[in-house]
Image: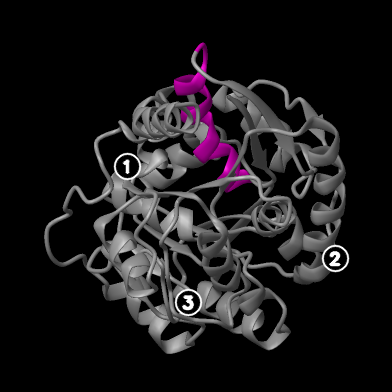
Amino acid sequence: MKLFIVVGTRPNFIKVAPIIKALEGSIDYRLIHTGQHYDYKMYNIFFKDLDIPTPSIDLDIGSGTHAGQTGQVMYEFERLLFFSKPDMVMVLGDVNSTLGATLATVKLNIPIAHVEAGLRSYDKSMPEEINRVLVDHCSTLLFCPTENAINNLTKEGISSGVYLTGDVMVDTLLTTDITKSDILSRLELDTGDYFLATIHRPVNTDNLDTLTTILSAFEESNEPIIFPVHPRTKKLLGDFYSENVMLIDPLGYIDFLQLIANAKKVLTDSGGVQKEAYLLGVPCITLRDTTEWVETLGWNILVGADKAKILDAIQHFSPTGERLNVFGNGSASNKICEALDFYYSLCNT
């Protein structure tokens, strides 16, 4: 079996690392990087931290509008498919690279495997929601992280090729030694004495009033907040300064996990960070009105960009309910590999 695996962003890198390890020696794969994240801190450092091999091909797409990125990936990836003719293409998550590669692939009648299938926020104002729905409906194999994801697909009439694998991010987290990070000493932080924040989604960054409201809540909280700034967000911050908000460059995976694990609470609009906070037992305040990771609610509260809600959650939110093991035990990558082997054997009988 000749498998192409398409990655383009930090979340993709985290998800693909354990899959590659599981595939080694069993399936002939090529790692294709679209270049959607191209900055060193957004790309190479993650490959180093996660021990991901250098991609076979970099499409060098770069930044752009949603349509621009998706269209560029479609065009460049289609050319590669014509030339290399893989037996299957694997895509991960819900980013523009995932959708672009999927559309190019399905139009050439090449089977698609979607890792992290079945997620739904039911908020179509989110570009990622559009991406994940379209990718699922184009896919042959759908690898679901939770029972809820399978139920979402069932509601949409998708039942063939669906597998409950657990979440590959659990695989990555369980095999990562965060004690190798010295980020706490570098930033002169103590466990439980700071909040960690991330903001990057268009709903919060494209509207300056919304971003200003969130930053104002951070400042008025008077709590120490560590804020690794996404390059997209950094351009919009201008000369923002607050005594209690520490702006830092994006971090590698190990440093970032260490910061989550030792934070008092996390403030984020990232889907992956919501889940990592849940897995590490850290309360999460989500700066969105909806979430595709509904399993985290109870340890995760949705506050949107409402200043009063953000401030109240910073001061008073406390998790409710038990943290259930809904994301698997770290065997998702092996299950994905077994399903690929089974599918390929069926195609050759």
Residue type marked 3: Arg
Q: Residue at x 34, y 81 (%)?
A: 312
Q: Quadrant of residue 86?
A: top right
**Observer able to see residue 236:** yes
Q: Which residue is mark 3?
A: 288
Magenta stretch in the rendered image? 10-25
Q: Secondary structure at mark 1?
A: loop
| Residue closer to the observer: 149 or 268 | 149
- Say left or right for 132 vs 29: left
Neighbours of disc 3 within 10 Å: few (<14), some (14-19), many (20+): some
| Residue closer to the observer: 76 or 340 | 340
- Say left or right for 235 vs 318: right
Please give the label number shown on residue 70.
Answer: none
Is the image coloured rainbow, by chain, by secondary structure, or in one colour?
Answer: one colour
Please give the label number shown on residue 165.
Answer: 1
Residue type marked 2: Gly
- CA distance separating discs 3 and 2: 25 Å
- Are the residues flagged by discs 2 and 1 in contact, CB closer than 8 Å? no
Q: Residue at x 62, y 77 (%)?
A: 204
Name the dominant secondary structure of the magenta segment.
helix
All told, the count of numbered labels is 3
Q: Secondary structure at mark 2?
A: helix
**Is label 3 or label 2 in front?**
2
Residue type marked 1: Thr
- Say left or right for 226 vs 8: left
**Is label 2 or label 1 in front?**
1
Q: Quadrant of residue 40?
A: top right
Tell me which numbered mark, 3 or 2, is placed earlier along the sequence. Answer: 2
Please give the label number shown on residue 68.
Answer: 2
- Is residue 19 on the magenta stretch? yes
